[in-house]
Image (spheres, rainbow, N blue to C red):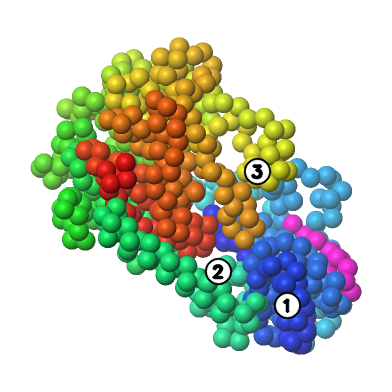
């Protein structure tokens, strides 16, 4: 994703008047705002939500008002108000969110001539109508695709030369022309501090903001800060109590983030009862893995293994002899290590980021998955056995008998069954379809999620050790299938024998409704399927009775995106993210006493 900016710029020198207007609107809409001082004759307003607030301000202010948006570097949009009326609109990519009418598209072309009065008011103005028209001119779709392809070829060529390359060689101003349009348009009207938004400023991304110390926050930020401090104290107290009770064993926080990006945890259970845990950054630094084992403490041993850069996923072989790693961020490969000899055995190139790695039960084959392909590699002689081409997907699961491999396909909405003996796709099954009418009715009742998906999406697959059950984490819950029924199905997955639903929660200032189960882990001794997701809870589903209950609610209810059960079934490890939908996230890893909870 590229940069996203959004701000309202009002031609006025009366900051107090604008502050009072915004205060009234903030009380009505329960929004938050930042307001700049007057700079070059403009007062800028940064709303916490990009919504109809611009029109509401225009209704109370008769002068010139410009609403500027840059969306993920993909398109530039403005709305121009004067005398309480919308005078002009422009979009550099009108069909971005879907096809619109020819009439509305014509309205979004922009009319540079309407800015004549505004230009006349600018002191020492050098901007012409012709210059505005030039900024609003965009390349054709064919030219965009050609530039994108050229940029991709340059990037791949630079990456092939090594880990360090000069991004200035990319035609950024042409490929990301919307970002250049946005910047040039603001400069034509002498508007400062346009390239930011409320969210960025709230997360201290204010290094280049002119006169930042004079900005006004509405409402008074001290009230919200006090609430956050009380909530943090409550969470810290709850975690302390869980630690004293012997439920929370270890908390591992992210190292200091580089730039604006947090480090991302990467972990896997070892072959006994511990966990390997490391942190992946964004600057190609080597990954340091630490080994956490009982008795649990904050001083784990280093794995002391020379891992390749940009590690993304890990898997330990059943015997504990081998470690497989999938890599991303330009390091498109899988790597195989000997944990006993502490050495790299094999590097397996992929066409895209490697999102999954698994061993066959007999440890004879390493299976690695990228978006477009699955590669089978012999562990004994390090030779490639086969390359299986498949569509968009990221997950795999191997049946305990070692014969069949499962892979999600077509954007997680289909399940491919592959015969490892023949290296052929046996069949592809669709997931359950959703009814759009029923979904719309649930949204109107305030019960359903905001986004509609035609089919269930698979987030994780696994098997019970005896191979009887196929266990799946879906977008909206967990599903347990009889494997024999799955294998005998012709075109779609059968009905699950046991299932439970994800909890629908509200996220963000707008209260978007979402429900996602990210991961599962199977306790084969108790016949219990553990799951985690967006709701910040670890839940258990009893396969014998169908009973689903909350095993653990994490204090503060951060999103839990990964759940690993130790191989001795005594502990489990969670990856969580506080403020998952905020600009700056706080990932952390915790190890929990599963026996104490179960």
- Magenta-tinted stretch: 80-91
Residue underneath mark 3: 447
Mostly what secondary structure, the magenta segment?
strand
Circle nearer the N terminus (2, 3): 2
Please provide percent x and percent y for residue 129.
Answer: 81, 71
Q: Quadrant of residue 518?
A: top left
Residue underneath mark 1: 23
Element type at mark 1: helix
Quarter the C terminus occupies: top left
Front-lying residue, 465 or 57: 465
Separation of residues labelled 1 and 3 (CA atoms): 32 Å
* Residue 85 on the magenta span: yes
* Residue 75 on the magenta span: no
Residue at x 49%, y 49% (from the top left corner)? 535
Seen as rendered, the residue at the extreme left is 341
Circle nearer the N terminus (1, 3): 1
Q: Is residue 33 above or below residue 176?
A: below
Mark 1 or 3, closer to the camera? 3
Q: Quadrant of residue 334?
A: top left
Q: Which mark is residue 200?
A: 2
Mark 2 or 3, closer to the camera? 3
User: Are the residues tagged 1 and 2 within 8 Å (C-beta)?
Assistant: no
Please provide percent x and percent y for residue 152.
Answer: 50, 48
Front-lying residue, 10 or 22: 22
Circle nearer the N terminus (1, 2): 1
Residue at x 45%, y 55% (from the top left corner)? 558
Q: Residues within 10 Å of mark 2 (few under 14, many from 20)?
A: some
Q: Residues within 10 Å of mark 1 (few under 14, many from 20)?
A: some
Front-lying residue, 593 or 5: 593
């Amino acid at each position: 994703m590229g940069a996203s900016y959004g701000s309202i710029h009002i031609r006025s020198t009366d900051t107090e008047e604008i502050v009072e207007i915004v205060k009234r609107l903030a009380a009505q809409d329960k929004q938050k705002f930042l307001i700049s001082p007057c700079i070059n004759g403009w007062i800028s307003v940064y709303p916490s939500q990009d919504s109809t607030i611009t029109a509401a301000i225009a209704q109370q202010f008769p002068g010139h008002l410009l609403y500027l948006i840059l969306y993920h570097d993909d398109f530039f949009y403005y709305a121009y108000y004067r005398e309480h009326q919308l005078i002009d609109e422009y979009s550099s990519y009108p069909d971005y969110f879907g096809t619109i009418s020819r009439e509305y598209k014509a309205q979004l072309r922009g009319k540079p001539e309407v800015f004549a009065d505004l230009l006349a008011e600018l002191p020492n103005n050098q901007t012409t109508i012709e210059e505005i028209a030039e900024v609003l001119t965009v390349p054709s779709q064919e030219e965009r695709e050609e530039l994108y392809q050229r940029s991709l070829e340059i990037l791949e060529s630079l990456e092939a030369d090594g880990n360090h390359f000069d991004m200035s060689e990319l035609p950024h101003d042409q490929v990301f022309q919307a970002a250049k349009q946005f910047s040039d348009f603001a400069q034509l009207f002498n508007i400062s501090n346009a390239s930011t938004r409320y969210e960025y400023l709230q997360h201290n991304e204010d290094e280049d903001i002119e006169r930042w110390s004079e900005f006004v926050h509405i409402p008074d930020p001290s009230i919200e800060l006090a609430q956050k401090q009380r909530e943090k104290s409550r969470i810290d107290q709850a975690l302390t109590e869980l630690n004293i009770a012997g439920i929370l064993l270890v908390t591992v926080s992210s190292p200091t983030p580089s730039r604006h990006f947090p480090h991302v945890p990467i972990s896997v259970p070892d072959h006994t009862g511990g966990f390997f845990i490391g942190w992946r950054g964004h600057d190609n630094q080597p990954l340091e893995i630490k080994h956490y084992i009982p008795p649990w403490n904050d001083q784990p041993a280093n794995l002391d293994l020379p891992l390749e850069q940009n590690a993304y996923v890990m898997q330990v072989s059943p015997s504990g002899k081998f470690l497989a790693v999938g890599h991303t961020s330009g390091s498109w490969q899988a790597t195989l290590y000997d944990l006993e000899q502490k050495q790299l055995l094999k590097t397996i190139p992929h066409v895209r980021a490697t999102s999954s790695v698994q061993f066959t039960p007999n440890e004879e084959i390493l299976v690695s998955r990228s978006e477009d392909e699955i590669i089978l590699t012999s562990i004994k002689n390090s030779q490639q056995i086969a390359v299986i081409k498949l569509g968009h997907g990221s997950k795999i699961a191997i049946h305990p008998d070692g014969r069949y491999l499962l892979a999600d396909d077509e954007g997680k909405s289909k399940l491919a069954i592959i015969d490892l003996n023949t290296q052929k796709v046996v069949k592809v099954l669709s997931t359950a379809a959703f009814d759009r009418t029923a979904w719309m009715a649930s949204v109107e009742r305030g019960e359903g999620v905001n986004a509609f998906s035609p089919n269930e999406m698979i987030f994780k697959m696994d098997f019970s050790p005896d191979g009887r059950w196929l266990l799946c984490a879906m977008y909206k819950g967990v599903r347990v299938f009889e494997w024999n029924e799955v294998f005998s199905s012709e075109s779609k997955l059968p009905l699950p024998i046991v299932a439970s639903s994800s909890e629908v929660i509200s996220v963000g200032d707008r209260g978007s409704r979402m429900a996602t189960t990210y991961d599962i882990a199977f306790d084969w001794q108790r016949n219990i399927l553990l799951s985690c997701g967006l709701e910040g809870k670890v839940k258990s589903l009893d396969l014998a009775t169908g009973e689903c209950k909350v095993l653990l609610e994490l204090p503060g209810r951060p999103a839990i995106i990964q759940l690993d059960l130790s191989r001795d079934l005594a502990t489990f490890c969670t990856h969580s993210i506080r403020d998952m939908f905020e600009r700056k996230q706080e990932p952390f890893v915790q190890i929990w006493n599963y026996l104490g909870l179960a």
